[in-house]
Image (spheres, grey):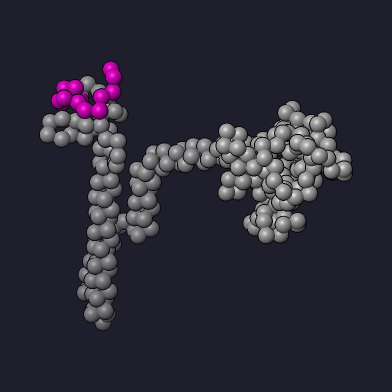
Amino acid sequence: MALKSVLDGQEEYESLPEAIRDHYLEDDGKFSLSVDGATKRENELGAKVAEFRDNNVQLLKDKISLSGQLDDVQSRFSNVDPQIYKKLISDQAKLDKKDAKVVTNSDLSSQIQEAVTSAIKPIQAQLNESQEREAAAQSSLEKSTFRNVINKASVEAGIRTEAIDDVLGRATAAGFRLHEGNARILQDGIVKFSQDRPDQAYTITEWLVSLQRDGGGHLFKPSVSTGDQDQVGQDARLKSGHLRDPSMKTFSRNLEGIASGKVVVNRSVNQGGN
């Protein structure tokens, strides 16, 4: 039987399994599926917990009242004769017998806590599961975004396609993490700044320059040049200035200048923007 959000009458409602009926609320002869707030069963449990609590609180008040009466009797008849004393003993026994039926404060708290815990346990389990799914989704999104940031910088720097995963692992080991949409190194919660440009954050591009110098040259495409002579033409190495829509080779040759901020890359709109 397909689950309907609104049932036309009592007969259709009673044809549902009992566990499902608890999730419908009656309104003028029709039954609607409750998707927000407490279910019928949860409301019933809440009412029972409230009744149980009120009854036990009243019993505790009765105990306090009876105890006060007993103290008053003992004070007023402390010097009575034995016959009266025996009477008081008999009265005391009666009070003790009645007093034994009163729930102690410790028992009351324990029973109320147990009933409340039992009532909210299913709801708490659903909340925990929802929070776990949300945390997992957030973690997956952050990992995917971080990978994309590293991939983009690696491609622009001339990293070989098959070496990009290697660079990702090295960047992670170097301390890079996703921070406000960028790859940054955090030191005691503070973003690490560039040595060449102390007013700006240390970037993944700068790190790739050091990677190329410090034994990572095999990760770059063969077209990447590390020579020291300036060249003329499209593939020239600039000391400063602008590069418009540079080729991969030109970008790689000017990687150090780009990282230092002395060389600025400009891209046309159809090339993906600045």
Q: Is 210 situated above or below 16?
A: below
Q: Is residue 25 magenta?
A: no
User: Does the image show residue 271?
Assistant: yes
Q: Position of residue 118 (x, y in %)?
A: 37, 43
The furthest residue to the top: 1
Left or right of 36: which side holds 163? right
Direction left: furthest residue? 28
Name the quadrant containing residue 123. Answer: top left
The percent position of residue 42, horizontal first and vertical second, equals 29, 40
Q: Would residue 122 appear left or right of 205 to someone viewing this image?
A: left
**Residue that lies at the very extreme toward the right in this rendered image:** 228
Residue 43 located left or right of residue 232: left
Task: Tell me which residue sits at (87%, 43%) in the image.
Answer: 229
Q: How far across and how far down the image is residue 160, in percent?
A: 76, 30
Q: In this rendering, would 69 be left or right of 254? A: left
Q: Position of residue 2 (x, y in %)?
A: 29, 19
Q: Residue at x 18, y 34 (%)?
A: 26
Instruction: Give the extent of the magenta segment.
Output: 1-13
Give the number of marks.
0
